[in-house]
Amino acid sequence: MRGHGQKFGRKQESAIAALLTCSTLSEAAQQTGVSPSTLNRWLTDKEFSAEYERRRSRLVEATSNGLRRRALGAVEILWRTANSANSKSTARVSACRAIIEFVFKSVEQDELREIHRLVEQLDEKLGGKQ
């Protein structure tokens, strides 16, 4: 039950945190002290699922930003390995492959973000009508 000014009760707040940190729904339910069926029911609730998705998106974005900040150093190490005469040929090939894969994944992610942005713009223009 929600109190004054509370969006969710203590158990639901705990459930959102557990869903963000546990590997499985059963584990999150156990950590929260509710049954998996209760947790499933909460996930079908519009407000609860929207808040969970909002927090999950923030966590994913923060994690992604942290990885991006550190990626330049990793790419530098890959580049040095790929270009070092002292590196074994298998290490050089692996480093080159990794650089190429990262470039393609980065481009793909940029394109997905752009598609997501365009869909949001269309949704705003349509006023959520479907």
Image (tube, rainbow, N blue to C red):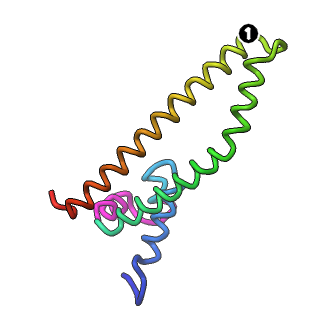
Residue 4: where, in percent of width, then height?
A: 41, 90
Instruction: Return the residue nearer the eye: 126 or 78.
Output: 126
Q: Secondary structure at mark 1?
A: helix
The x, y position of residue 14, in whole percent, is 49, 68
Q: Is residue 4 above or below residue 74?
A: below
Q: Is residue 115 left or right of residue 88?
A: left
Secondary structure predominantly adopted by residues drawn in magenta: helix
In this picture, residue 120 sits left or right of residue 125? right
Q: Residue at x 36, y 48 (%)?
A: 116
Residue for point 50% across, 57% down:
20
The residue that label 1 is drawn on is 89
* Depth order, front residue of 13/72: 72
Q: Is residue 43 above or below residue 1?
A: above
Write down the quadrant of residue 124 in the picture: bottom left
Q: Residue furthest left?
A: 130
Tell me which segment is drawn in magenta: 30-45
Q: Amino acid at mark 1?
A: Ser
Please tell me which residue is depicted at 42% across the width and 77% down the height of the picture.
9
Spot occupied by residue 107 in the image (x, y as percentages of width and height): 49, 34
> How far across and how far down the image is residue 27, in percent?
48, 53
Quarter of the image that includes the N terminus: bottom left
